Image (cartoon, helix red, strand yellow):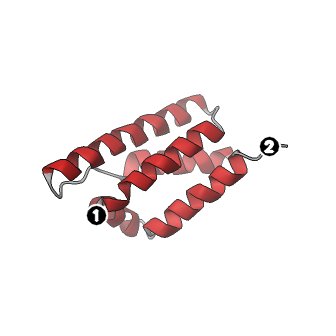
């Protein structure tokens, strides 16, 4: 399971670039992408992450919904936003289970 999370984090860090629709949206996309990349790098480096990190990843990714280039990158990889976020949500559910 953690390998899947690392793969998702790595994919997010490597595949996605900033948006450039307009100045206000560009800042929003840039900020969200920087946060996502930093989180992904932290998760990859530490290999010790859990509910908090995946919850933050889902939250940041939801902010990228309005970023057309983000969706274009997903499509280039054979994914769509809804499937990607559903996958992250499923991982979040599993990571946040308390036994």
* Left or right: 50 in relation to 63: right
At numbered mark 2, what does the secondary structure look like: helix, strand or loop?
loop
The residue tagged 1 is: 68
- Residue 47, image x and y in percent? 62, 33
Mark identifier at residue 98: 2
Farthest residue to the left: give it.
23
* Left or right: 50 in relation to 77: right
Q: Who's the residue at 35% across and 52% down the image? A: 16
Residue nearest the observer in this picture, 5 or 82: 82
Q: Who's the residue at 58% across and 29% down the image? A: 46
Q: Residues within 10 Å of mark 2 (few under 14, many from 20)?
A: few
Q: With respect to residue 64, does 76 lie above or below?
A: below
At numbered mark 1, what does the secondary structure look like: helix, strand or loop?
helix
Q: Who's the residue at 22% across and 52% down the image? A: 25
Q: Who's the residue at 34% across and 38% down the image? A: 34
Quadrant for the C terminus, please: top right
Residue nearest the observer in this picture, 96 or 45: 96
């Amino acid at each position: 399971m953690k390998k899947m999370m690392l793969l998702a984090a790595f994919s997010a860090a490597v595949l996605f670039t900033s948006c450039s629709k307009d100045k206000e949206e560009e800042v929003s996309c840039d900020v969200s992408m920087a946060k996502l990349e930093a989180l992904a790098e932290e998760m990859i480096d530490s290999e010790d992450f859990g509910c908090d990190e995946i919850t933050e990843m889902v939250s940041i990714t939801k902010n990228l919904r309005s970023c057309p280039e983000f969706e274009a990158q997903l499509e280039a990889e054979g994914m769509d936003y809804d499937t990607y976020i559903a996958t992250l949500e499923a991982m979040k559910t599993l990571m946040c289970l308390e036994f």
